[in-house]
Image: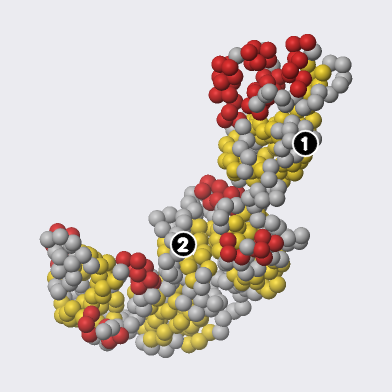
Amino acid sequence: MAGRSPLVVFLYVVVVISGCLCISNIASSAKLRRNLFNQYHSLLLPDGKESTIYLLKDITKRYYFFLEENATPHFSITVTPCDVPIEWSILHYKAHVSHGKIADGFRFFDDLKSQSFSKTVSTLFHYKGNSVENFIGAAVQSSLFVLELLSTERDTHISVYLTTDLTHGNLFPELPGDPRIDVTSLNHNSATLVWKPSPSAIRNKEYIEYCLLVNEKHNYKSLCAADTAIRSAGGKHTKSSTFPISQYVDDNDNVMILSNNEFSIIHKTSNLDVRQICIGNKNTYTVHNLSSNIQYYFDVFVVNLLTNASAAYTGTFAKTLTEPKPKVSYLKDGKIVQLNFNGKRQKVYSFQYQAQHKKVQFTFQLCRGQIRAQILKNGKILVSETIQGLRHITLKGKPNEKYIAIVKSTELVSNSSVMVQASSHIFKPLFPFFPDSLKIKSFNKLRTCDTVTIAWLGTQERNMYCVYKKKVQEDEVWREMSNVDRCSGPNSRPKSEKVICKYFHDINVQRAVTSETIGGLQRDTSYLIDVYLMGNSGILVRYHSKLVKTRKNC
């Protein structure tokens, strides 16, 4: 278009479409051109950039873009709904003169004063739904295009990506010709998935990875849709750094797990649990710790780590098998049994115990990880809870009644261990009674450059308490705490970490508090403090580790 800038051409066309301004005035008024640009520039769809667009219910939103003459004649638009189904169309505006001859590009504007003007609108593409859709179009001359967007269900948001560089401008990873996910193995607590590799992953392994979503509700057609569902259900997607932790629970009860270069997030909300697992560029994965006889939905997304854009494989679903009944072992009165779970399968232990008296006490001491315990009598569940720390459960019944104790690992944590005991002699327990709280308190005002002061609760029984310290780096804290074995005693620790061992008790439980000042520490240094309660039978209780730090300046 001789003598005209693309901006002037666009402004002319916007005026023709809106029908609200005189074109001849635009040609002669630079001020009006500036005002019009200020009014419409926010509706220009950027080339080569993904845009987030918010839609109000039943209100059509329009975005404009145009292809210049002598430029690349092709374009690609990808629209990703992040919630409800939407309608969207691509309209192409053509300009004509009154005698039927089509103007060459937009040059009819040069002689607009002597010719009457009309326009033709054609719909190039129309779609309604919540799938990620892409349209590739072309124009033989300078053309104006309009993207119309409409949500009829509720307010929502979407992402739109426009590019005119079809060779190098593809933001999204490619899907294979067959994007289906196959379930190749299925049992009561795991499922093995296989899918064909993405061509993008084959060419660029270093910045392409696969992420899985596992949930019990339905399949998701985009990561954007899954994130919206999690947020609306009350959860929050939380990013984590890649330091080597095995488990971390954030303020929103999301559980993040990192092991063997696999990053998992378990979003826990009131009515939606979604497990997200990113596994690098492997195209097969076995999902463990599933519940039996439950239908799960599996989605796979190939993600470009440079652009954060993703493409969805065709989701699938499968129902896990019914869990086989566990073999029942017999639990002898007063005998302590240690159970270990390796995390590869949701193993279940089942024990039968016959009471000798009316009262019976089950004791569970968690060594590491997390387990769930159930106690049944005559087929009725009496107790069902997640065990944390040391737990005494006292039940009342009749002599010679039979109880069934079932212990299994949870779906959240692997490599768990627990000690179990059942006894009718509840007044002579092997496990020591423990205080109301196993927390260690530190006193900030008593902290110096080489000492810290701590306190903890005791009991009415005379027991020995041992205090240990360990110097740690701040970025090692979570790894140290996640690897703690609460059933291992002070004998497993170096003598250099020992602070003191002392006996303590108080008949008045309200006054059963003791403290200790730990000296000889280094300035501006972090330490993990541990307290062990040593019972008369040799069974111990380990308090929750406490992180303290000495002052930098004194």
As measured in the structure, the alpha-carbon distance from the residue carrying label 1 to the one carrying label 2 is 50 Å
Q: 338 or 72: which is nearer to us?
A: 72
Residue at x 79%, y 18% (from the top left corner): 118
Image quadrant of residue 163?
top right
Residue 27 against residue 341 in the figure, above or below: above
Q: Earlier in the sequence, mark 1 or mark 2?
A: 1
- Point out residue 552 in the picture as x, y percentages from the top left corner: 18, 61
- Point out residue 146 in the picture as x, y percentages from the top left corner: 70, 31
Q: Residue 403 carries which label?
A: none
Q: Is mark 2 on a helix, strand or loop?
A: strand
Q: 275 or 124: which is nearer to us?
A: 124
- For the N terminus, the image quarter is top right
Contact flag, marks 1 and 2 (Cβ < 8 Å): no
Query: Looking at numbered disc 1 in the image, what kind of residue is underneath it?
Result: Ala
Q: Is mark 1 on a helix, strand or loop?
A: loop
Residue at x 65%, y 48% (from the top left corner): 169
Residue at x 80%, y 26% (from the top left corner): 104
Residue 242 against residue 163 in the figure, above or below: below
Look at discs 1 and 2 and give the one toward the viewer. Answer: 1
Q: Residue 139 carries which label?
A: 1
Disc 1: CA contacts within 10 A as few (<14), some (14-19) or many (>=20): some
In the displayed structure image, the side of residue 520 where residue 389 appears, left or right: right
- Point out residue 105 in the picture as x, y percentages from the top left corner: 77, 27
* Residue picked out by circle 2: 255
Residue at x 42%, y 69% (from the top left corner): 245
Query: Looking at numbered disc 2 in the image, what kind of residue is underneath it?
Result: Val
Image quadrant of residue 353?
bottom left
Image quadrant of residue 459?
bottom left
